[in-house]
Amino acid sequence: KLCGYLQKLSGKGPLRGFRSRWFVFDPRRCYLYYFKGPQEPLPLGHIDIASACFSYHQPEAGAAAAGDEPAAFEVHSPGGAVAVLKAATRQDMTYWLQELQQKRWEYCNNLDAAKRDSRTSPTPSDFSKGLVAKDNPGIILSQNASAERARNILAVETSPTDLVGEQAASQPAPVQASAINFSLKQWSTEIKNSMSSLRKGNNENRKSVFYTTEEWELLDPTPKDLEDSMALEEKRKHLAEGSKGRRLTSSAFPFDFGRIPHKARRPLLKDMIGSSKNRTSSDSSPTEWCPGSGNKLVSELQLKYQSQQEELEKLKKDLLSQKELVRLLQQTVRSSQYDKYFASRLCEGVPKDKLELLHQKDDQILGLNNQLEKLNLEKDSLQQEVKNLKCKVGELNEQLGMLMETIQAKDEVIMKLSRQLSECEDGASSPGGAVNSPTATGANKELQELDRLKDNLQGYKTQNKFLNKEILELSALRRNAEAREREWQAKYTSLEAKLCQIESKYLILLQEMKTPVCSEEQSPAREVITQLLEDALKAETSEQPEQAFFKPHLVSEYDIYGFQTVPEDDEEEKLVAKSRALDLRSLSLSENREISAGVKWENYLASTMNREIMRCVELKNLIRSGIPHEHRSKMWKWCVNLHVKKFKDSTAPGYFQTLLQNALEKQNPASKQIELDLLRTLPNNKHYSSPTSEGIQKLRNVLLAFSWRNPDIGYCQGLNRLVAIALLYLEQEDAFWCLVTIVEVFMPRDYYTKTLLGSQVDQRVFKDLMSEKLPRLHAHFEQYKVDYTLITFNWFLVVFVDSVVSDILFKIWDSFLYEGPKVIFRFALALFKYKEEEILKLQDSMSIFKYLRYFTRTVLDVRKLTAIAFGDLNPFPLRQIRNRRTYHLEKVRLELTELEAIREDFLRERETCVEKRDLISDDEEDS
């Protein structure tokens, strides 16, 4: 993983300078994201490496030796933007440049293969698992051999330092030359990062926010800042007594949220600049605020602010004294009222000794209260002394450091003078030494100059090799882009020619249909229709290699999930299926909002590079819009682990393999039925179409392992389809836990048992929701006595498998695995609402029931369906579903008890009655 610390040049005017950032390369989009730090959730921005070029400059003459000084390089974007980055050493700079070059080369070479057909191979297969990943092997185009050889010759091999790689995240960021550490661009990202760090809830010190009029940013205090702030507090300690908000000073370092009960005022930009100037006056910082009159104006504003703050401190002190006086007066009034009460009300009939005892107790209480107040005052004074002592310790440490530096400087002077003295003594002892000294000095200078020139020559050679390699790569990438443009132009021409042919036949057909036909002879329209049908249903034949790329693949034999798009048996159904596939293809091509959804997912996943994925509203909205194909394996696995974590924690390692081994070694009652249903699971999917398919063996393993885990259920028809869908994106063990999630976490008990009790209950709950959410449609069904639960029962049992088109099916499963079974009710109602008007037009029970059997396959617009499910049907509380499940569960159980009683009465009557004794059912006869 290419990541590490770099300094990025940002800001404008006097605030422009290098700021340390944490950079992470994302190979999915060839973006270089940069964060405030390794633990920040949201990136501050990104640099597009795929279309960028790189350059750097040699250091000036007299600079430090190569490899020791910070080295800057430039990333040029096509729009003219230049990002200036600085590595800690020239070795790190060389490593970053060669890695970014290599990543750009790999990404651009594989660009054609990844985008050749967005339906059959939408993305490289590195991010998918399960059976779907096997369909999309990474296709790498043949590369130019001479270009590869030249790249290898010109490559500069460099190993990274500790500031590059994932291990660099545990190290502190490199020290910056400038003390100003805020930018004026990504203020919204800074706010989100700050709020995210505050919501983590761990024991780390939470810091305040450094505000400006344009941006706020989280800053960490340095030891120098702490010492300066302590010194400033010590100078103003006579104003700080009695003030509870004393920590809010004019210094700009962060303070602890937990210790300040009131909300801090946002420092103004002038205050930050003045305080930053005070802190950095002793440092050699290249950043200065403004010259001449600007500094004077800032100083005046700072003095004015300090005087106003002093007045505020005085007012606070006066306020505290007034509050103390009011408190004492209130205490005196209470004590007098207390004495008056005892004197007037309680003295009658009460012995004097008890009154005296009460007065003594009151005096003791007052004395204890006074003593407590004194102790509190002493505690405050002691705390104040501790703070003053800490400030003094800080000053002493600073003085000690200055003394140590002074001693070190004096030692260096002494050593220098000692060397000079020894040289003078040597010169005096040898008379010829004075004559040879200038010659030796000149020779040494020439040798140093020669070494410097050799270093510069080596540096220029390295720079020349890098720039030659950059030119070579950019030329190759430009040629590839030109070839890709020519290929797309040829494909566009082929599509335009085919469109013209279809339009010509369509116009002929319209003209013939407009003209009435009086004779019984076959009209030309029938010939045109026959020809159009043959062209539409004609199988795609192999063409010449030069035409294979230009052929418009509008409808493939299988979609990206492995489902067959056009059936092979029924001609009429074949035409309808191909028409449906073309409509889906048209929707996917014309849907521009898919791009924005993909960008949102990329940004969200980029924000989770340095932290774990957590449940939040943003993630729920993204999942409801649909998980992209390339990220579905990762997100499904995360959703499953989220729901079964407690089950996994209670099992031993290798739990799935143990269950599978038991199922293979011992006879299982459910294994016979599992074998019968394997090939009937998804016969229209190529992964389960034959006994030798890879999916069949995986499906068998998961079902057998689950039958051993849950012997109460064992196996139920419907579980095989759930596992088959899960295996398309998950490995065997993850698919097993996905089935556990659905059966044991999401669905109620007895949902997949022999009685299907839970499934029957959900159908009654769904009827209640239909009458509430879609009253017109429910009344229409009641009027014509249509029991639509015969259709919806299978929807709930297998979560819409084989009921809707595959694109919609997997969008439903995305939300189902994240939110749970409530999603099934939402989409079941949404399907009826989607086609509500069409159903209301049907006026007899036979046509209604026939339409309900296939209408879900005609729903193609997944965005409209999702908007209905999660928008038009709100509110949709889960508590309501649970209450209705409880209510109907009792009713269904009572009905089943009555049926069981009727059955027992019938059996008893049959045993006693001679005429009915010979009547037995087929099941009893088989048994």
Image (cartoon, helix red, strand yellow):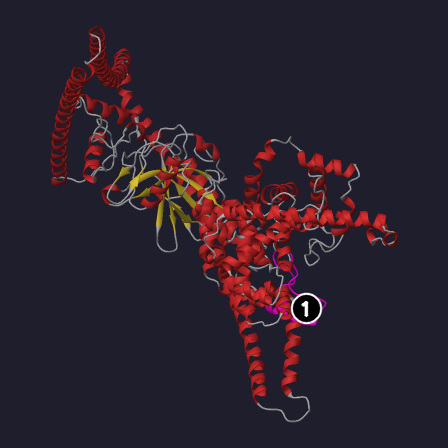
Q: Residue at point 79% right, 46% down? A: 672
Instruction: Report which quarter residue 96 is drawn in.
Output: top left
User: Is residue 650 visible to the viewer in this orientation of the structure?
Assistant: yes
Q: Nearer the viewer, residue 852 or 213?
A: 852
> Where on the picture, by quarter, is residue 164?
top left
Asked whether residue 556 is drawn in magenta, I would say yes
566 or 405: nearer the viewer: 566
Residue 55's spot in the image, x, y percent? 39, 47
Q: Image check: 679 left or right of 50?
A: right
Q: Give the image location of residue 61, x and y in percent.
A: 31, 37
Q: Quadrant of residue 238?
A: top left
Q: Which residues are magenta?
A: 550-579
Residue 210 position, x and y percent, is: 28, 37
Q: Is residue 711 above or below residue 227?
A: below
Residue appearing at x 48%, y 38% in the figure: 612
Return the residue at label 1: 541
User: Which of the two residues, 534 or 905, is positioned nearer the viewer here?
Assistant: 905
Q: Eyeballing the image, is 419 above or below 207?
A: above
Instruction: Tell me which amino acid carries mark 1.
Output: Thr
Is 231 drawn above or below residue 728 in the view shown?
above
Task: Say what secondary structure mark 1 lies in.
Answer: loop
User: Horizontal and vertical percent for residue 354?
Assistant: 23, 8
